[in-house]
Image (tube, rainbow, N blue to C red):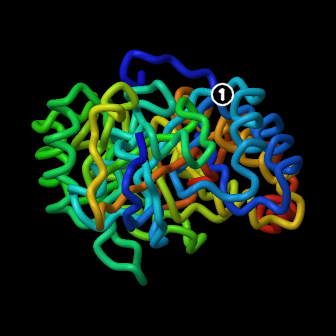
Amino acid sequence: MQEAAMQIELNGTRIETEAPTLAALIAERGLDPAAVATALDGAFVARAARAGAPLIPGARVEVLSPMQGG
Amino acid sequence: MFYDVDLHSRLMLGTAQYPSPAVLAAAIEASGAEVITVSLRREGAAGQAFRDLLRQSGRRILPNTAGCHTAREAVTTAQMARELFGTRWIKLEVIGHADTLQPDPFALLEAARILCAEGFEVFPYTTEDLILGERLIEAGCRVLMPWGAPIGSGQGLRHEEALRSYRAHFAGVPVVIDAGIGAPSQAARAMEMGFDAVLLNTAVARATDPVAMARAFGTAIAAGRMAFEAGLMPRRDMAVASTPALGLADLGPADLGEALA
């Protein structure tokens, strides 16, 4: 099935995606689902809940990884 | 000691600002630290290499919420960190000012209440305010982390007398001095005062030789703790001779009156 393209914000950058869910977006971007943590519109979305988290136009997605910190 | 985890080393080491990943790995090793702090950020170029480094270090991970300015941001970051690192530990930082990096006590307490209720084991980065410390404990925190001085400032224990009161007030609670430590002598001082650990980053990462400085801090903190356990002598206002007066020889000039008698 062909999904409609829409604009969302991924890590602060506006992108075009056809991914209907957060899980699909992770796959579309070629990210390792186990190596990142995700938030949708400022709220945490657990790994298991990504497939059930629909993306709508204008959604703000954060995909974060371990980084150096003090 | 810290949420039922006993540590041998009382140094907790940050992983930011090192000149290279190799120096970071060597500094962790040299420090002897069993706990290292990390953050969550948008994926950068060196993400995979850093994940490998964390795994290889074998150290316990203490993720932070650095950069968060609201309770909601901090709670979301903590939830993301718990999933990613597989730990309930969180160094809770809610910053009030971008320039001073002073903790926002109100947002800190709000976030601590939420996270403790969700089963997190919270290490709250706080000022040395006693009432705030009590509220954090009421919220469920079983560790407190007052600042030594502003983050990255290297000023040491800026309010030493207030921290002494803090240590006494929270006698049964593990208390970690977090931030502002610039020199091993300052870290040793904190340990001599009876604090349970010291968390630092910049003083090691920004040293001319971070690996040697990591070793220096590890050694100083161990020495400070040993001194605390040994029991420091009380400070005195006046001199007190340490060598006994008993048996002191008379080597002064002969008494003229006696010689003439």
Q: Nearer the viewer, residue B22 or A41?
A: A41
Q: Nearer the viewer, residue B90 or B224?
A: B90
Say which element carries label 1: loop
Q: Nearer the viewer, residue B257 or B159?
A: B159
Using a 10 Å C-alpha cutoff, classify the residue at mark 1 as few (fewer than 14 neighbours), some (14 to 19) or many (20 or more): some
Q: Is residue B259 left or right of residue A50?
A: right
| Position above or below: B219 against B119 | below
Q: In the image as oriented, which residue stretches furthest toward the front? A: A1
| Position above or below: B55 against B179 | above
| Position above or below: B136 against B165 | above
The answer to which image quadrant residue B66 occupies is bottom left
Residue A55: x and y in percent read 30, 51
Q: Is residue B152 visible?
A: yes
Chain ID of residue with mark 1: B
Query: Quadrant where the C terminus of chain B lies?
Result: bottom right
Q: Residue at x 30, y 61 (%)?
A: A59
The answer to which image quadrant residue B172 occupies is top left
Residue B93: x and y in percent read 36, 56
Q: Residue at x 47, y 65 (%)?
A: A16
Q: Is residue B233 visible?
A: no
Q: Is residue B222 left or right of residue B166?
A: right
Residue A32: x and y in percent read 60, 35
Q: Name the residue beneath numbered marker 1.
A: B59
Q: Residue at x 72, y 40 (%)?
A: B218
Q: Is residue B153 left or right of residue B15?
A: left
How many marks can you see? 1
Residue B77: x and y in percent read 36, 49
Q: Residue at x 18, y 60 (%)?
A: B107
Q: Nearer the viewer, residue B183 or B90?
A: B90
Query: Quadrant where the N terminus of chain B lies?
Result: top left
Q: Amino acid at mark 1?
A: Arg
